[in-house]
Amino acid sequence: MIWTRLFSFRSSRRPADRADTMPRASIRQGPLIRRASELPEGERMEALPRFRGNAGDTARVARGDRNLGAARIKLQQAFTPSQPVQDARRFAGRKETLAALIRAVEEQHLHTVIFGDRGMGKTSLLHIFSRLAREARYIVRYTSCSETSEFDPVFRACAADIPLLYHGDFDPTSEEAERGGTLADLLPEGPVTPVRVSEVFSRISGTRVLIVLDEFDRAHSAEFKRSIAELIKSLSDQAVRVQIVIAGVAANLSELLEHIPSIRRNVIGIPVTSMNEDEVRELLQLGESASGLTFDEEAQDAIVEAAQGSPYVAGLIAQYAASSALDREVEMVEKQDVRVALDRVMQEVKVRLAPRSQFHLNLLLSMASPAELGALAQEGLRAFGLVQDPAKGGDTRRAALIARAVEARVLVPDNGNGGDNFRFVDDSIALYLWLAKCAA
């Protein structure tokens, strides 16, 4: 019957029968498949994925779904893993670290270096700290460093934030102060040096100034870092009312700031380490309060395990899990939603890997399962991508796993950290493997 219809369709000489009037696709593929172009305009629009809200922070709510629509809008503000926390009401954990930073600045008048791994919340900490300092009438200049950061433009901008009103050589009623002059007006036209900046800053009175240099590790210029160290030394020697707060990705103080021996007495290092379990749960509780959703106990446990103390990872999984619950039209986030979130995060992590790293990751996964590799991945996440030499523990099974990872070029020797240790070629590989283990 099918062959007869096909033949009659293709022959223009035979009388038209039913097959002749049927669309070609219906003969080849069975049921009629309508192309998007064949649908009425209204149906074409309904078939497309849609935004759940609009730029005015209001929801597109289906009839009878008003509460869930409002919850979805609140969810967008409850968990913001891609943005630093700036609202103190949503700042989870880190109370002791924040207190240590305030003490170092207020009581000891020390310059401060904040260091830690990616995703640990250093920038969020700095934003909350800066807000609290401004409330205490400090002048705060926040700068995010880049690969091309140079001393002259950075500190000219800092000087431009300090009114001449606070310079000891200018009366508050002087013409220069009243017309809005700043310390930048006192700097020479040519490139400024640490000595010259320190001389201008040394006349500050009536206030204190904080210069926050975030993402300091991104700055490539050795000269820039050397100049910062020289300025810190000069400001400290003259007891200037200016303190510098530096933050960046590093395992220790010396890794982040060059020439540290010359300013060791003038700087305090504050590590920002992984959140503990209670702090991660506090993050989830704050998200619950902001979104109106609830994470059941199993979902919370799964997020705590997967996050490994990273507020970024915890917030990302929580956001996607909550979105999954809303897709199911419920307000209780369950473990099944966390599984959906883990799959989504894993996809994002893998896409961010370079093609070569993706190839090596796939090669390793063909040699061993995520469940087997989970312990190595967990160790790498807790130690800046480092994995200890298996010979130290005498674990032959672990040594075999490391050998496979080295063969796949996911781990490489790292002899610069004491002993024959290994390092993940990309930190994201360790995160992917750990999430895959949690999702298994």
Image (cartoon, rainbow, N blue to C red):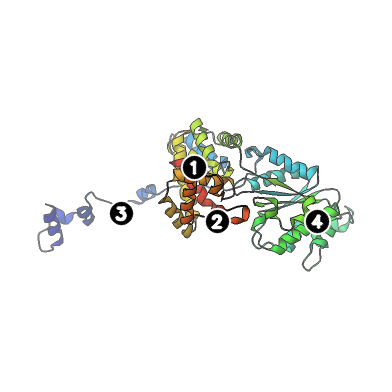
Residue at label 3? 35
- Find numbered disc 2 in the image and state the secondary structure of the residue it sits on: strand
Residue 413: which disc?
2
User: Where residue 118 sits: x, y (%)?
Assistant: 60, 49
| Residue lying at the far bottom of the rendered structure | 190
Quarter the C terminus occupies: top left
Residue at label 1? 320
Is residue 292 visible in this depiction of the protein?
yes
User: Where residue 312 sits: x, y (%)?
Assistant: 57, 45
**Crowdedness near tag 4: few (<14), some (14–19) or many (≥20) residues, C-alpha within 10 Å:** many
Front one among 66 and 404: 404
Amino acid type of the residue tagged 4 in the rendering: Lys
Front one among 217 and 312: 217
State left or right for residue 286 relative to residue 238.
Answer: left
Q: Where 230 falls versus 129 (above or below)?
A: below
Query: Considering only order in the chain, which callout, 4 or 3, is on the residue closer to the N terminus?
Result: 3
State left or right for residue 97 relative to residue 399.
Answer: right
Query: Considering only order in the chain, which callout, 3 or 1, is on the residue closer to the N terminus?
Result: 3
Instruction: Residue at 15%, 61% (x, y): give it.
Output: 10
- Find numbered disc 4 in the image and state the secondary structure of the residue it sits on: helix
Q: Are marks 3 and 2 in contact (CB under 8 Å)?
A: no
* Quadrant hosting residue 178: bottom right
Amino acid type of the residue tagged 3 in the rendering: Arg
Q: Are marks 3 and 4 in contact (CB under 8 Å)?
A: no
Nearer to us: label 1 or label 3:
1
State left or right for residue 313 relative to residue 101.
Answer: left
Residue 233: which disc?
4
Query: Considering only order in the chain, which callout, 2 or 3, is on the residue closer to the N terminus?
Result: 3
Q: How far is the residue under mark 2 from the one under mark 1?
A: 36 Å
